[in-house]
Amino acid sequence: MPDSPGAMKESLRDDESAFRQDIEKWALAAVPVLQEVAGSYGGFITYKALATRVFEETKTSTRMLVPNFSSRLLNRVIRLCLKNNLPALTSLVVSATDGTVGTGFDAVLRASGREVPDTALERERIAAAERLECYKKFGADVPIDAKPQLTPKYEARVNPPKQEAPRPKPVCSVHGIQLPATGVCDDCA
């Protein structure tokens, strides 16, 4: 592909040294993107949207599948966050399908010397606490009483909205049958 303004270059996965350099470049581009996301209380970004933004910022892409690419990218972002004493920006990256950070977030916990939780819900709650720290650090308008929140999609899955119980139909006190729309029992009238 010619080197023209705006042209996208593809990273060479077969050249491990060049690919490592590209991962570094992508991670350095991902940090400000994630800081921007953290600037909005309740904000998060999908894996695919982050990859797209990073490719646009660096003018370099890869044909690697998003899950494979994301794990390598986010592992490098984790290291940058730890090195620069930043909250876990990777907590802002969630699956479009279910709104979770997924098992890849365990790398954040391991890298920071914390225990990996036993359940997905525990993992998502830890990620929610990390997201809250990101919002506070990067200028989001965070309510004073803010508590960590699961993403709306995951929250709806683990705490589905309560269905209102159907109202009982009026029944004739004499015959025990459901009353018609008039409210008067046909047999009593």
Image (spheres, rainbow, N blue to C red):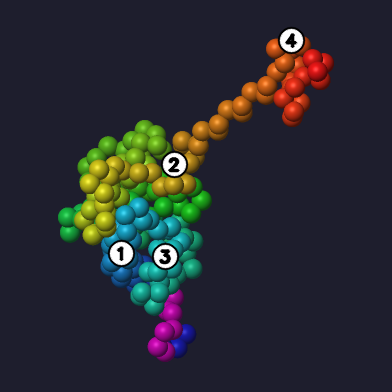
Where residue 133 appears, x then y in whole percent? 24, 50
Q: Nearer the viewer, mark 3 or mark 4?
A: 4
User: Which mark identifies residue 51?
Assistant: 3
Q: Which residues are magenta?
A: 4-12
Q: Which residue carries the number 4 mark?
A: 174
Mark 4–mark 1 CB contact (< 8 Å): no
Q: Amino acid at mark 2?
A: Glu
Q: Is residue 32 left or right of residue 187?
A: left
Q: CA distance from mark 1 to mark 3?
A: 15 Å
Residue under the image location 38 percent in, 56 percent down: 44
Q: Residue at x 33, y 45 (%)?
A: 127
Q: Which residue is mark 2?
A: 155
Nearer the N terminus, badge 3 or badge 4?
Answer: 3
Label 2 to label 1: alpha-carbon separation: 23 Å
Name the mark nearer the viewer: 4 or 1.
4
The residue labelled by disc 1 is 36
Sort mark 2 into few (<14), some (14-19) or many (20+) by Cα contacts within 10 Å.
some
- Amino acid at pointer 4: Val
Q: Nearer the viewer, residue 127 or 104?
A: 127
x 40%, y 69%: residue: 53
For residue 155, above or below residue 187: below
Magenta-highlighted stretch: main secondary structure? loop
